[in-house]
Amino acid sequence: MAEKITTRSADYSQWYIDLVRSAKLADYSDVRGCMVIRPNGYAIWEKMQTALDRMFKETGHVNAYFPLFIPESFIAKEAEHIEGFAPECAVVTHGGGEELAEKLYVRPTSETIIWSSYKKWIQSYRDLPILINQWANVVRWEMRTRLFLRTTEFLWQEGHTAHATPEESQEEVVRMINVYKTFAENYMALPVIIGKKTDSEKFAGAVDTWCIEAMMQDSKALQAGTSHNLGQNFAKAFDCQFQTRDGKLDYVWATSWGVSTRLIGALIMAHSDDRGLVLPPKLATRQVVIIPILKGDKAAVCEKAHAISRTLSANGIPAFVDDSEQNSPGWKFAEYELQGIPLRIELGPRDIQNGTCIVARRDTLEKTELALDDTLSVSISEILNAIQQNLFDRALEFRNEHTFEASSYSEFREMVENGFVIAHWDGTAETEAKIKEETKATIRVLPEEPDYISRYAMHEAGTCIYSGNPAAQKAVFAKAY
Amino acid sequence: MAEKITTRSADYSQWYIDLVRSAKLADYSDVRGCMVIRPNGYAIWEKMQTALDRMFKETGHVNAYFPLFIPESFIAKEAEHIEGFAPECAVVTHGGGEELAEKLYVRPTSETIIWSSYKKWIQSYRDLPILINQWANVVRWEMRTRLFLRTTEFLWQEGHTAHATPEESQEEVVRMINVYKTFAENYMALPVIIGKKTDSEKFAGAVDTWCIEAMMQDSKALQAGTSHNLGQNFAKAFDCQFQTRDGKLDYVWATSWGVSTRLIGALIMAHSDDRGLVLPPKLATRQVVIIPILKGDKAAVCEKAHAISRTLSANGIPAFVDDSEQNSPGWKFAEYELQGIPLRIELGPRDIQNGTCIVARRDTLEKTELALDDTLSVSISEILNAIQQNLFDRALEFRNEHTFEASSYSEFREMVENGFVIAHWDGTAETEAKIKEETKATIRVLPEEPDYISRYAMHEAGTCIYSGNPAAQKAVFAKAY
Ligand SMILES: [Zn+2]
Ligand SMILES: [Zn+2]
């Protein structure tokens, strides 16, 4: 079995690294800042991809693929974009043994290379909308890396859409941030807040950046997905005009939106514990492990274990048996807890005689006795649903308990060490920067969800927590990953 | 609709390019040698990925992801490997605004970066086998490019396995080339010959390269997939030893195998015609288009068309309706023939009265009348199966008709302009090179399939077609893509 994992209370950062490596989710490679996503980690990404890809297609999108390389002159076409991205790019200067006439940037994001194609595809309103998604790798040079959360290369999807009107593109931006929220909450069991970023936190080249913001177990914030309203910025940069329905010329309206393998880091940090990974059943490739207790008539116990496994799998519950004699049941319990298998079935000769088995939940570690009859699949399925729901409820309760409303800056400074702080903000970048400098907390999100807004009276006018100036609204502040 | 497509007989190369661009499968990008895979083309790749990924998993493989960048010193560790690949690499020299201490190669293939990880993961025979596949983009600088067939960047999968014995790795090599053959024949409807490459055509760093070789409609050969026996070459290069079952130390045995988006090019060139793409039903995201003839009671015709579409889809036959009034039925017929939709249903008010519809096959362009009753889904399904089979049969017949046995070099030179030529070869690289120089034909494959071997008496000794020296076997020669 793997090395011991540091406890969360002892050292949260070290716990995370230990867990990722012990559960064989990922590893640093010999290339600075780049990770190897190991099969256990990649399996989570595959489950995420399948769910998201279906949701993208259900909302009318298709997949395509654009080049990895972006000519320097393209990146330079949108002023804010190059300022934001050029410093963190990897640059190809040689190809096929020769120095290139123009440097190629390894894509940090694909707006520019994609809009150079869209320009050719769009002449008239009849060519719109274009609703394309791409699954790809991207590279952003990082000085301080952390597996899954911040690495030089990562995997993601990036949607890039083109529309005839600003209303349509705004609708798309909101539609996709809601798709992300549904995915985060229903699959990852991760409660998130939808809202906008402030100007200082938005995407380089966007008019508006919408995000979903989540809380980790150390009460820090993590941005889990973004959806950008790009206005006509990229269409103007690439001179992409179209003939409108009433015969005029206009620039095309754009959006882009993405989530990445960073979500795997969020998943780990939201739910896992000192024993290892805790996976929501909907993202587990293997939902049930059956461990036969090999005493007495071993063959009979194994046979029964495999029969149960087949029945569960036939009922849509992916199960497997570990009947290796090399390792003890106790070793196996620990190993599959580390790997985050949602349910464990323990099955001994006595259980079979009694017509029962012991079922242990990964989330609560609770054990229950279940009857070994026709009701088993249904019972197991109910427990898996309960785990999925419990992970969400637990995370939401944690977030609520760690969300504070500050009425003074000194209170704010204390509270922000322990969670999200809701406070009045005067709307200036200056105040935002000062607070960041003094507390390391940033404005994570200006919520756009009616429930959240009314619960915390986000739109109530007041006095800025920092400057004392009038504030039209409150913001959610936190330290973040 | 799209521009006119050049006919195959007028200019086969131009036909291919016209088709790829008119059917919106792919396009050149503004980055030299790199293509944009458009949604229609990417949809084919997604179908291929789904089928292959399932076959890989059924044979025990799991997916993972390794870095895009490879340090120069890694590529250099295997002598043949660097000689083969370094000249065609894209090289990153700057990252994060600074010049790098060591150059990074954009992966042309991942043996070296993967074996630098395997070295850390493998200590004992208990850690073996490792059966990993990766879906990724790779870059090989190309001077002369052709959409899908040869581009600087392309998408592929690369399997990389590690084994305790040479027997096991050899088994894996053969298992995977057979998986590729099954995929090519059952999904792509493309008959292929399994065999080995000669030393001059094998992978840089391999002991042996197995391949599947196919014939296109211009009777040229196309290598559709490879499976390499890497022996202990990469384990030695990365000093990857393991403790064997009997307590000794040995180097690990390796294989690698891959297919790429090149298969889309093969698919097009094998089956398509002067009207456009012809897709085997198993690789078509949309198998049936229903075109209502909008005369008389338009609403009733549309309603019936949608009802048929729903019924087919519910029976596992993805169908859709084009009831737009903007374009004529004739325009639609041509457009969906161009796009390669396997079956078209034409449905007018009179058909509905008669309780029938017209069904047109894309492969033969034949029309049949079918009854609009409960038998429709079954009938459609049978026709789709017949199309899948017919495409294969037709391609196999074409290959057989264009396979010749040469008994003299002058005969050889003529025959090789029209297909595969089977001829005695003295086994030397010198003869191979001379024939290539004089005829542009290369040895495509030394067949390893009993049927093919006996049909053409491949293992019969004789006299080399070129040198007149004794020849222990025959080889399959052809001009190739
Ligand atoms: Zn608001
Ligand atoms: Zn042989």
Image (cartoon, coloured by chain):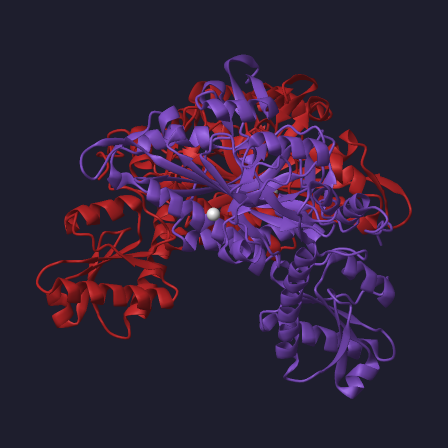
Chain colours: A red, B purple
Q: Residue at x 63, y 75 (%)?
A: B382
B399 vs A45: above or below:
below
In depth, the one of B297 and B135 nearer the eye is: B135
Q: Residue at x 78, y 79 (%)?
A: B300
Q: Residue at x 75, y 86 (%)?
A: B355
Q: Quadrant of residue B349?
A: bottom right
Residue B342: x percent and y percent? 70, 64
Quadrant that contains the C terminus of chain B:
top right
Ligand 1 appears in which quadrant? Answer: top right
Residue A38: x percent and y percent? 39, 38
Number of numbered discs: 0
In depth, the one of A373 and B63 nearer the eye is: B63
Q: Quadrant of residue A147?
A: top left
Q: Quadrant of residue A481?
A: top left
Q: Residue at x 70, y 51 (%)?
A: B268
Q: Residue furthest right?
A: A247
From the viewer's perspective, is B75 left or right of B272?
A: left
A272 vs B284: above or below:
above
